[in-house]
Image (cartoon, rainbow, N blue to C red):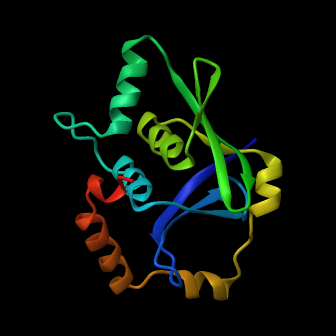
Amino acid sequence: MRELTVVEVRLDAEQGSPVLILKETGGERQVAIWMTAAGASAILGALQDADEDHPSSHELILSIVRHLGGEVSVAHIVGHQEGVFYAELIIDGRPVAARPSDAIAVALRAGVPIKIAQGVLDAVGVVPTADQEEAEAPNEDQVEQFRQFLDSVNPDDFEP
């Protein structure tokens, strides 16, 4: 397993979908994980100070685990198939299947590492060129558009 750090959450320039960019610690490769607006919002929320009076679902999960005497130790990205990533949280040494966005949001809130299986990193990790980094950097309009999108999203938008 290789450790990853969160670089940013942004909108994909072509599709307008939220994408999480992770970078291997001590390396150059990056991994892009496309996700729902709710998943992106959860990760962005986990990067901010918690609201103790109104905890998010991920803060609640972490609180429940801790109140039951458990410990979240790491989030693992364990697989990738046809553009879909698979993840798990390690709770008391046992894996619990989770969506990558949920596993990462809980890991960020818990202050524990995010790791990726070496085979997954080898398959999907890329070293961005200087041209790609400049072309992919969001401009202020894109950032504002993403913020407005997140502000306008409500849970009912995701009901089947």
For the N terminus, the image quarter is top right
Q: Which residue is painted at 37% across and 21% down in the image?
A: 64
Q: Which residue is painted at 66% across and 56% down in the image?
A: 84
Q: Position of residue 133 (x, y in %)?
A: 60, 81
| Left or right: residue 136 compared with residue 26 | left
Relative to 120, residue 112 above or below: above
Dividing the picture into quadrants, the one containing residue 128 is bottom right
Relative to 130, residue 118 above or below: above
Q: Which residue is painted at 28% across and 45% down in the image?
A: 49
Relative to 88, residue 69 above or below: above
Q: What is the number of callouts on the image?
A: 0
In the displayed image of the protein, which residue is found farthest to the top? 69
Q: Which residue is painted at 57% across and 47% down in the image?
A: 100
| Left or right: residue 139 compared with residue 7 | left
In the displayed image of the protein, which residue is found farthest to the left? 53
| Left or right: residue 4 compared with residue 118 | left
Q: Position of residue 68 (x, y in %)?
A: 41, 12
| Left or right: residue 56 compared with residue 92 | left
Q: Nearer the viewer, residue 16 or 123?
A: 16
Relative to 69, residue 58 above or below: below
Q: Position of residue 132 (x, y in %)?
A: 64, 84
Dividing the picture into quadrants, the one containing residue 27 is bottom right
Q: Position of residue 147 (x, y in %)?
A: 30, 70
Q: Nearer the viewer, residue 152 or 131?
A: 152
